Amino acid sequence: MRGTDIADKALIKAIVAETEAALDAGASPPRTLFEALNNGNPGDPFSGFRQLVFGGFTLSRNLEEAHATRFTHLHLRMENTILADLPGALRTHPASPKFVVRDLTKQDAAVNHAHFHSAGFSRKLGYNLFCAGNVSLTDGRLLFIGGHDKGGNNGIRKLNIYDPEYGEWVDRVQAPVRLDYADDPTGTRPRFTPNCVDHAVEAGRPPIIDPDTGRCNPRNEENTDPPDPSDMTFQRWYPTGVTLPDGTVLLIGGSDQNSELIKDVCEDAGGDPVECDTPGALKVDVDRDEVNRSKTRPPIPEVYFPQTDTTTPLYNAQKHFGFYPHCFVVQTGDGVHGWGVACKQESALTDDDYEGDIYTAADGTMRQDPETLSADSRRGYSPWPLTGRTYILDVIGALADPDHAVPRSLQESDQQSTNHWTFVDTAESAHDFGAETELVTVGADGHTSSHLVVAFAGENGSASIIEQIDYAAATPTWMRGQDFPAGEEHDQNNAVTLPTGKIIVLGGSDSRNRRDRFGVYEYDPATTALRLVANEVVPRFDHSTALLLPDATVIIMGGNRSNLMPAINPGVQDSPADQDLRNLMVPNWRIYKPAYLFNEDGTEAERPEIEWPPDAIGFGGTFDIEVDGDGDVASIASCVIIRTSPVTHNWAWGNRWVQLPCRQDDDTVTITEPTHRAQAIAGDYMLFVVNTSGVPSEGRHVRLGPAFP
Ligand SMILES: [Cu+2]
C-alpha cells in the first residue's frame, strides 16, 4: 500500500506543490517525492508523512522512489492498488504512439487514464499487501496472504480477500494506527487518541500507547495487525499460498521479525552517540545487528478454509523453507484424496541448528541464533541458504491428526513435528527468486501422462541452470535442461506458459553482479531447448510481473521503479545528472507478441476461433465447442485450459497449463474434462485451441468446478 492509498491526498498535493515551487525558484529542494514527504524533524516521529502513515517505520527507498514529475498529479488521483480495464488501459496515443519511456508526456498518460480505477482503501482494503502471498480461490476471489506493515522482515497475520464480483475487499478489522491517522492526519492535535483504548477494551487487554506520543504505539503488533478470526497463527511476509483440490488453501513459508527487539540508535545535536532516552536525542538509525537477530521463518504450515473464513496451523508438518517456497499440487494416487503438495527450497539448516534458541515455534517468539546468522548470511533480508531438496506434503494426513493444532517446536529429529513430508529428490539449485511454472498433460485414458514443473535459474545455487521434474513419473527426478548462455545469469525473471506449451522467460537480472537481463527466451520442455526470440529494452527484475493475456500475447508489468531506467553507469553511484534521468521513469506496461501470431512475411496469422464455449465445465465428462476458420486454420491439434491466477515475484502462483484430450468432427471439437481434481485445480481458466500450424485461438473464459467432490 502506497501512502496515497491511506493518506490525505490534499496533504500530499500540498507537499508536492511546495516541492515544485522550490524547484521553479531554483532552490535546492528535495530530489525525490520520497524525500519531500519525509523531510520532517527526525526527532519528532509524527512530523514526516512516512511516520504519519506507517507509524514511524521506514520502507525501503527504491520501492517508494518517485519524483514530483509531470506524472505526479495524475498519479495522485490513484491508489496503489488499481483495477485496469483491458484493452482500454493498454491504449496508446492514436496520433503518436510512443515506445520509449523518456518520450512519454502527460498527454500520453491521459489517453488511457480513465481505464484505471482505485481498488485499495476506497474499496475497503486496510492492510499493506507489499510482498504478500497471492492466489486465486476456486470461486474466483483473490486471496492475499500476510504482507508487511513496517520495515525489515515484519509480516502480518491478515488474510485479505478481493471479490471481483463486488469490486470490494472482504471486511477485516481496521488497524488502530490507521484509525489514529484518520482522526488526525497531520498529527497536530493534543497527543491523545482513543483508538488504542477502544481497541484494547474490545479485546479485553490494557491499551498499548506510546508514552512519548500518546498515540497507539506503532511497534506493537496489536496496533498494526489487530486480531481477526480469519488470521493466521503466524505473521508472514513472502509466504506461499497453494489452492488445493478441495478448495482450501495451504499457507507456507515466509518471514517475520520481532520488532520489539529493535533498538534505536541516537545522537545528540552535535552528532555524538547518546542513549535515546536522553533529552534532545535524535534518532539516526536502528541497531542493525538486533534487526538481523530478530528475523525468523515460521516453519509451521497452515490451512485456510474459505467456507468458514478460518485458519488452522499444522504443528505436525513443520519444515523450514525460504521466502516464497515454490509449491505445486501433485497427484499421488487415483482417489479423491490422492494428492499432495510438492515444495522445494528447504533451508540448509541441519539438526544441530535447531538446538538452542533459534526459535520457539509454540509462542511465535522466534529468534535466530546470531552465530548461525552471521555464518550463513547471504543478503540482508533473507539470511538462510536454501537448497533444491524437494518433498511432498500430505495435507489431508496432517489435518486428520488430532494433534495438528497443538503447539510444539521444530526439531528435525522429532518425528511428531516433521511428519507427513515425503522426500522426492534434490534439484541442483534451489531456484529461489527464479521463475517456475507447471504443465499438466491429461492422457486419452484420463490419467495424468505428465506433470512438469520447470525451474529457471534463481539465486541460491547456479544462476544459469534450468531444471525440470515430472511428478507423473514413477520416480520423479529433477533433470537439467539447456542452460542460459554464459554471461546471461538469471534470477528475478518471469516465465509464462503459452497455449502451445512452450514457455517464455523474460526480464530478470543477475542480481549478484547487478546486471539487467533483456533477452526474451523461449524454452521447450519437450526438448529442453532454450532459444533467444526477442530483446526487451525496459529492465524488469524484482517485483516485475508477466502474464498471458486472453489474446495469447504476454504482458509484462512493473519492477522496482528505480530500475525502469537503466543505470547510466552500471555499478557506479548515480551522479545528480544520472538521477535526473532516472527520475524520468514512469510505470509502463509492454506487450510481447509471440511468433505464432505472425506469418513468415510478417502479416498477422489467421487464427482459429472458439464459438459457444460453455460457462462452466466439470470433472469426468466431456464438453463441445464450435471452431470457426477455414481449412488448416480450423484444424485443431491441441486443446488446453490455463488457470488464471495472480503472478508476482517470478512466480505464476497456480497459473497451471492443462492439456486435455480432444477430438474434432468438422466444426465441433469435443474436449474431455479433467478426471482428477489434482489435475486441474477448480477455478477460472482460459480455454484455448491450437491449430496444426501452431497458431492459438483467443482464450475464452470457463469456470472449472466444483472444488468439493
Ligand atoms: Cu517483494
Image (cartoon, rainbow, N blue to C red):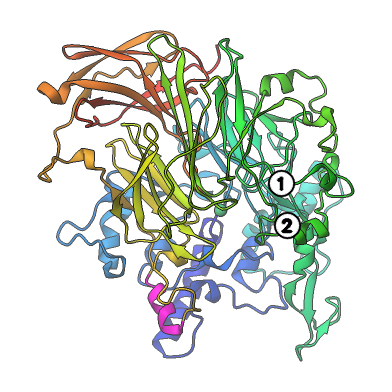
Mark sitting on residue 348: 1
Find out whether the residues at labels 2 and 1 contact each other: C-beta distance under 8 Å.
yes
- Residue 480 vertical position relative to residue 544 in the rendered view, above or below: above
Residue visible at 78% across and 75% down? 265
x, y percent for residue 50: 61, 67
Looking at the image, residue 43 sits to the left or right of residue 465; the answer is: right
Label 1, secondary structure: give it: loop
Q: Could you tell me residue 620's position as x and y percent?
A: 44, 9
Q: Which residue is mark 2?
A: 376
Image x and y of residue 217, in percent: 77, 60
Percent from the top left, x then y, of residue 93?
21, 58
- Residues in magenta? 575-584
Against 596, residue 310 (above or below) is: above
Closest to the observer, 682 or 379: 379
- 112 relative to 30 in the view: left or right: left
Characterize the magenta stretch by its predominant secondary structure: helix
